[in-house]
Amino acid sequence: MTDRRELWSYREIAAHIGVRPDTVRSYRKHALLPEPDVVERGRPLWYPETIREWVSRRPGHGWRRG
């Protein structure tokens, strides 16, 4: 079994980027999220580094309307 402390689910990704977990699921459905690093018991999981890299390449990174 994989060490869960090193992997993020939809919930951790959502918290990291400031959206709801359903939004992250939608990103995956529309191929806007990287492929999971691991699928454990049918659940996709990502290494934090994978998500941080993805965030750094997202359009509009670093800009938020106030």
Image (cartoon, grey):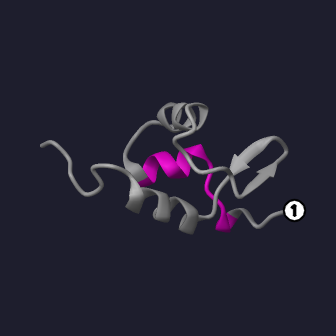
Left of 53 or right of it: where is 65?
left
Residue at (25, 57) in percent of width and height: 62
Left of 35 or right of it: where is 17?
left
34 in relation to 29, above or below: below
- Is residue 11 located in the magenta-colored stretch of the structure? yes
Quarter of the image for residue 7 reads: bottom right
Q: Which residue type carries mark 1?
A: Met
Image quarter where the N terminus lies is bottom right
Q: Secondary structure at mark 1?
A: loop
- Residue 58 locus on image (x, y percent): 38, 52
Residue at (72, 62) in percent of width and height: 4
- Residue 16 locus on image (x, y percent): 43, 54
Closer-to-camera residue (36/66): 36
- Residue 13 locus on image (x, y percent): 51, 51
Residue at (66, 68) in percent of width and height: 6
- Residue 66 locus on image (x, y percent): 12, 43
**In this picture, which residue range is highlighted in magenta?**
5-16
**What is the magenta segment's predominant secondary structure?**
helix
Which residue is under mark 1? 1
- Is residue 52 located in the magenta-colored stretch of the structure? no
Few, some or many residues within 10 Å of mark 1 (<14, 14–19, 20+): few
Residue at (59, 51) in percent of width and height: 34
